[in-house]
Every structure is written in C-alpha cells, then in structure tokens.
Amino acid sequence: MKNSKFLRLAPWVVALVALLVVPFTASGYITALFLSLLMYVTLAYGWNIISGYTGYVSFGQVAFFGVGGYTCAILAKGGVHWLVGSLVGGLVAGLLAILLGLVMLRLKGAYFAVGMLGLTQLFVALAGALKRVTNGSTGIFLPPSLTLVPVYLTMLGLALAAIIGTIFLHRSAFGLRLMAIREDEEAAESLGIHTTVYKIIAFSISAVIVAIAGGVMTWYVSFIDPQSAFPASLNLTMVIMAVFGGPGTVWGPLVGATSLGLIAELLWARYPGLYLVIYGIILLLIILYIPRGVVPSLGDFLRRRGEPVRKRRSGAVA
Amino acid sequence: MPEPLLVVKDVQKHFGGVHAIRGCSFQVAGKSITGLVGPNGCGKTTMFNLVTGTFRPDSGAIVFAGRDVAGLRPHVMARLGVARTFQLTRVFKSMSILQNMLTVPSEQPAGERTRWAAEVLDAVGLAGQPETTAGNLSFGDQKLLEFARIFMLRPKLVLLDEIFAGISPALQERQMNVIRDFQTRFGVTFLVVDHTMRVIMNLCQEVLVMNQGQILARGTPAEVSHDQRVIEAYLGHRTTTKGGDNRGA
C-alpha cells in the first residue's frame, strides 16, 4: 500500500524537482518559456474557480491582472519590494472583487460574460485617465530585474498554490456548493445555500490569484501601461486554456495551459506567419470533438476501457 | 386541534396586471399531511413560491412556527426548516447522488451527515450506487433524489410540488410510504400539491382546494371530493342552457 502511494507521488516529485532546477540550468529562453507557461497555468486555475466551478463564465478576469500589476508597479516605484507589492495587489483585487461582485454577479450567463468584458474596457480607460496614479498612457517604468530566478520561483509557488488549493476545493463542501450553484442556482438557494456569499467568495479568490500573477509579471517586464496591464489576448487565452483542459475539473487547467501554451510557442517559432491560423484550427477541432475538455473526455475513455477491472474490484468490496 | 405550523393570512400577489393570489388564507396543522389541489393556474405553485421566499407577497402575513416570515429569502427559509421540491426536477446533474445530498449545508458533523444521507437514500430506494452521476439516472430516480435531498435540511415543513407526476404507481407507493414514515418518526409536516387524486385521497388527512387565487374549500378528502363548489371549479357549472360556462375545466 505504502509502496503504491509512493509510486503515485513519484512522478509529481520528479516534475517538481525538474521545474525547480530549470531557472538554474536552462537557457534564458527556456526559463522565460516556462515562466509564461506557469503564468498561463496560474491564470487558468484562477479563472476555473469562478467560471469552471461556479459557472459564472467571465471574459474579464484580466481586469484583476491589471489591478495587481498596477498595485505592484505603484508600490515598487515607492520603494516597496515587488513581492510584497504583488501580494498587496492580490489583496486589493480581492477586496475590489467583493464590491464588484455585489453588482456583477447579479448578471447571469452571457450577460455576466459580456459585462466583465465591458468592465475590463472601463479599467483600461480608468488606467489611462488617472494620470497622477498610473502615469496615463505613458506608463510606469520600473528598474529592470536582472535575474529571472526569483520571479520564476514566485510564479511556480503561485501555480502550485492554485493547483493544491483547487484539489482541496474540489473535495470540500464549499466546492460542492459552488458546483451546485453552477448546476442550478435556484435549487441551491432552496437548499439553504446563501448563493450570493458563495459566488462573491469564489469571485474574490479568483481575483486574488490572477492579480498576484499580474503583479509578478509586471515586475518581470519592468513596465506597465493600460494596454500591457489589461491585455485583451490574455483575457481570451485563460478562458480557452481552461475550457480546452476541462472547466470545473482539478487537472483541466493544468493540461490546457501547458499543452496549448507549448503548442502556441512551437507554432510561433516555426511558422511565425501562419501560427495564429493553425492555432485557430486546432481550437476549432477541439471544441467540435471534445467540447467538455480533454480531462473529462480522457477520463471517460479510460473508464470505458477499464470497465471490467473496475467492476471486479467493486464487486469484491460489496 | 393541533397547533398550526404554517398560517397564511389574506395574502395578495400581483404579477403586472395578473392578480395571481387574491386574499388567500389557510392553515397547515403541525405534523399533518395536507393536500393542496386545484385546477391548473389557480395559484398553487405561486403559493409555494410565496411560502418559500421566492416571491414576496404584496400584502398579508405568512407565519411559520410562530414567526412572520413573509419576504425572507429562500436560503433563510430553508435554514428555518422549510424545504421544497420543484415541479420540474432540479437535481445537480453533473454531481453524484451522494454529492447532491452532501451539498446541503447543515450544522451537523460530517460523519453524522453522511450517515443520515445513507439512511434517507435507503428509505427512498437509492442506496445502491451513491457514486452514480445524477444526470445519468432515470426521470423517476431523479425525482426520488430531489425528494431525498430536501431531508438533508432536517426540515419541519416540506412542500412537494407534483412529485408523483409522471412516475410509476410502484414508485408513487414508495414515496407515499416515505412521507408517512417521516411524518410519524420525525414529525415532519407535508403540504402536497398534486393532480394524482388517488395519491391525495390516500395520503392526506386534510385537503385545501384552491381556485383563482383563493381557498375555495377545505376538509377531509372525502368531504372536498363531494363539495359542489369543488366539482364546479374542476368541471364547470352544471347548466341547462346550451354552450354553458365551462371556465376552469
């Protein structure tokens, strides 16, 4: 029994050790690639909590990415350590999400999705207008970070925290209730679940994760302006990655973010002119043939193949 | 006369120009099984939505266990012990049977909740495969699961909206037995809306008849089924003129 548990954990330990040594051994290009993959993983997990588990599909979580980025940049400019700045950015975004959630989470389905998209535009406009704080469209320049290692390790820690947090969420009563809201909000409320509170907490946790990632990336890039703080492409990328892997699952965002992140990188390196076309075709095929995402579909496939074994085992227990 | 658990007094509810509930008053005795019948559109489901907090009454009082609860939110009503099922089944389809049960919040420790979930599932006949995904269950089993799930609230008052519709007589029999069992063992009070007269006649100690947003008659099943007003509400007026008034048929 102990042996099999060790065997199950072994690949994870190997992967973790490999990820830990990357920034010390690999080239700058590889480290930067892994950093961006870890960021995608983090964002996909952040999105998964409010949209995958709770069913409030947001096309605007990047708003919190920018809030985290600006908080970190403004604090770093004032002499605060960037790591502290990023964590404060997470806190600010979390509190902001509580206030925004009170309004936005009254919207459902497509209205919420589009409402969040509109909110991002509002944030872009605000970041341009509040010149005193954000330096408007000129942006804020930070001293360039000379080494990737601390940024990389921070993002690795954040991604791990998001994954482990999701593992616990998936098994918890809190997670069950988020799923119940996704399945049927009115029924959930009739069973005594204070749906508004649950939704706002999920929204806020999602915002914290995304915002810390935003802060760390801003320090890494050493610059922020309204366009780089709220990148529209990133907004869509985190949705696509989570949906590709399997929204509302523990491993979906990891599978989606790493595989699509790698595919995009390889295509970009090989076919710079055509990469978006090919990427688009791959996405279309996936949505057509495995709309629920890779992880649930693969799970079903393995279960069907393993059916006789499983039956025998459960029969022995009963 | 047992203490009434639920008192509805002169409740009014409009939806735009539609006067759905027109001064509705009734009482439900504690630990009873009471039927609520009436022609389609008479306001039964609206009344459920008012009692469970989905709608707020325009005027009138709703008193549950001695407390005015009119306008309290559904999740608050659920925590106070008022549980309901929906006319269209609303199980959490992507979740397992057991997950459906354990989603319901309660102050009990986890072990006790799991044990209670198993007991309720056993009572309704769904104990076999608690890991089955709810969406894969048959229509009848989904109805049983929704019915079982509300008992996780340890409710005092249960409102059942057509749980007998569209399921086999054998399953209906099982549900009736569970209702009687929970009434006697745990003192749960039931208010049952249904069109299946066989069930209402067998199950209920008292029947309330609604028509056009008001209580038309009340009494034992035998009494109301012979009440002239009730017969008219369902079948229309007896008339000698040709093309008589058949409203409410």
Image: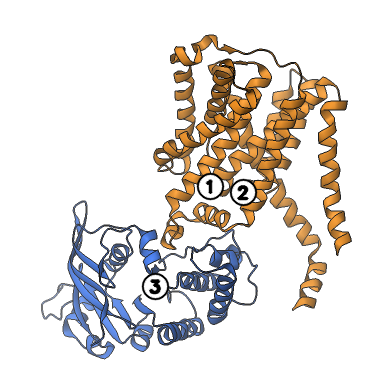
Chain colours: A orange, B blue
Q: Quadrant of residue A49?
A: top right
Give the image location of residue A107, x and y in percent. 41, 42
Q: In this view of the protein, which residue sits in the foreground, A5 or B178?
A: A5
Q: Relative to residue A148, is residue A76 drawn left or right?
A: left
| Amino acid tagged 2 | Gly
Whether residue B245 is visible: yes
- As measured in the structure, the alpha-carbon distance from the residue carrying label 1 to the one carrying label 3 is 29 Å
Q: Residue furthest left?
A: B241
| Amino acid tagged 1 | Gly
Q: Which mark is residue A214?
A: none
Are the residues flagged by discs 1 and 2 in contact, CB closer than 8 Å?
yes
Give the image location of residue A105, x and y in percent. 43, 42
Q: How would you rate the neighbour count of disc 2 (Cα within 10 Å): few for under 14, some for 14-19, many for 20 or more?
A: many
Q: How would you rate the neighbour count of disc 1 (Cα within 10 Å): few for under 14, some for 14-19, many for 20 or more?
A: many
Q: Circle 1 is placed at which residue position?
A: A55
Residue at 56 percent of width and 57 percent of height? A176
Residue at 81 percent of width and 34 percent of height? A20
Residue at 59 percent of width and 21 percent of height? A80
A93 to B149, vertically: above or below: above
- As measured in the structure, the alpha-carbon distance from the residue carrying label 2 to the one carrying label 3 is 32 Å
Q: Relative to residue A136, is residue B130 drawn left or right?
A: right
SS for callout 2: loop
Q: In this view of the protein, which residue sits in the foreground, A276 or A119?
A: A119
Q: Circle 3 is placed at which residue position?
A: B162
Q: Which mark is residue A248?
A: 2
Q: Residue furthest top?
A: A138
Instruction: Please state, as top left, top right, bottom left or bottom right, where the C terminus of chain A lies in the image.
Output: bottom right
A316 to A49, vertically: above or below: below
